[in-house]
Image (cartoon, rainbow, N blue to C red):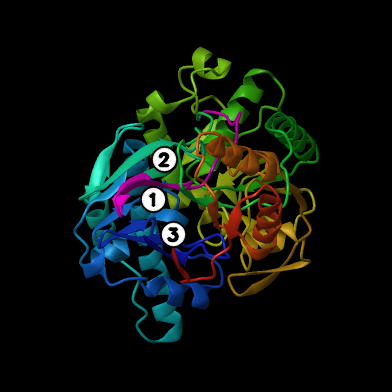
Amino acid sequence: MDITFAGAAREVTGSCHIVHVNGRHILLDCGLFQGRRQETHEKNLRLPIDVSRIDTVILSHAHIDHAGRIPLLAREGYRGTVWCTAATRDLAAVMLADSAHIQERDSEFLTRHRKSAVPPLYSMADATQAAELMAGVPYHKTFEVTPGVQVTFIDAGHILGSASVILDFEEDGRHRRLVFSGDIGRRGLPVIRDPEIPQGADIVIMESTYGDRDHAPYESARQDLARIITTTAARGGRILIPAFAVGRAQEIVYDLHSLALAGEIPAIPIYIDSPLAIEATSVFEMHPEVFDRTEDFVQRVQKLFRFQQARYTREAAESKALNEAVGPMVIIAPSGMAEAGRIVHHLKIGAPNPRNTILIVRFQAEHTLGRRIVERQPTLRIHGEDVPLRAQVEVLDGYSAHADRTELTGWLQGVRRTSPSLRDVYLVHGEAGPQDALAGQLRTQGYRVTCPEPLAQVSA
């Protein structure tokens, strides 16, 4: 078996790994690269393998950095199956349509300003074709993806429908098992279940996003959320939250609902300003079978994401009207790294106001607007203009959907307890610093750890 690390190698976006086994090529994810516009556009245009050679695609979850180039595969002629869970299929359908809309809108903007045609990466028709290729499979159901290669999904606990991938195959007369962690979630996150631990692995491809640090406990993040909203509202400011429309938005709304019912936050309006978040929330409501039924709030409340203070704004005119509104409010809008979408407009207007708070609730990749906010750079470049950053900046990594250093090592130790032949671990989905720190720690525990460079190929 050969593995080519064609994305999320020494970085956290563009997840794509090519497994070549028994003469077949299997893609694990095919995500968008995110970061500097020109650099990532060129990387996204280059598919890692000729589409005619791809036998099947396995998708770990719906986030765009894992699924976002599947429409490009469809545009280039891929007509095989994209295997995923049912919830991932439904979430990906709305996310890829939104991504295509952004591609087409950006193309129109760039074409106008550059006076020459700049084609979109893919179109809405390509996104529709990609969604039609997706087949949803339940957790724990083993199925064949190519002759002699079987796959099983288990819950990764990252977002709704996220999966760790167990890939079983026969090679040289013996059975082998490759585990692809996908993005590993955290224990105790709201709504979704805790990550499951794969068993019997021979080889592991594991994410390493937070390989050098531990998160604050989730419960303390919830308390900090209440504090930030209360203090910002008291000074008449807005709380601006860049958040993935899928996952973080629903979890934040879930906690705001709980805090509102408990009287722990003031009765200010909470705007979920995103058509995509509205569609994604509907998908969440379609899949209560994967909710964490051990949570008291899930058991007690029928409509987790609908309450008096929550206001979902679909139309652009509604979003623009928020800029003229007065009084404190919460605005949750994508994108999660503040690179596109409605949050950019809210930040352009809200960042100069010291009464406001920008609340960061997820990892921010290098060269993104969100990263510059986390670094508290005094001036932000937004829509070609210099915007002073005077708003308060708060970072709550307790809301991260990625396992931290202790949780990653604990997950791998859990795998090893049932995996006597496990030695090789390949770290992906991490920047060099966190990845190297985690690799060093794992090597002291007896693992043979590799941090593959982009497009590196290994025989495993």
- Amino acid type, callout 1: Met
Residue 58, x across and y down, in percent: 33, 51
Q: Which of 403 and 239 is in front in this view?
A: 403
Give the image quarter of residue 41.
bottom left
Quadrant of the rendering where the C terminus is positioned = bottom left
Q: Nearer the viewer, mark 3 or mark 1?
A: 3
Q: Which of 226 and 426 is in front in this view?
A: 426
Q: What stretch is highlighted in magenta?
A: 167-191
Nearer to us in this view, 46 or 200 = 200
Tell me: 70 left or right of 66.
left
Q: Residue at x 59, y 31 (%)?
A: 189
Q: Does the magenta stretch include residue 324?
A: no
Question: Of the residues under marks 3 and 1, which one precedes in the sequence?
Answer: 1
Q: Which residue is at a point 56% across and 72% down the rendered structure image?
A: 36
**How many circles with numbers are drawn on the protein?**
3
Neighbor class of circle 1 (other Cα within 10 Å; few <14, some 14-19, many 20+) is many
Tell which circle, 1 or 2, labels the residue nearer the N-terminal end: 1
Q: Name the residue under label 1.
A: 95
Residue 1 placement (x, y as % from top left): 36, 60
> According to the image, label 2 marks what residue?
280
Mark 2 or 3: in front is: 3
Cα distance between the residues tagged 3 and 1: 34 Å
Where residue 357 sits in the image (x, y, percent)? 73, 47
The residue wearing badge 3 is: 460
Q: In this view, does 173 lie above or below 73?
A: above
Instruction: Give the class, few, some or many, for how many residues have Cα within 10 Å of label 2's Cα (few <14, many ≥20).
Output: many
**Spatial distance from mark 2 to mark 3, Cα to Cα?**
38 Å
Q: Give amino acid for label 3.
A: Ala
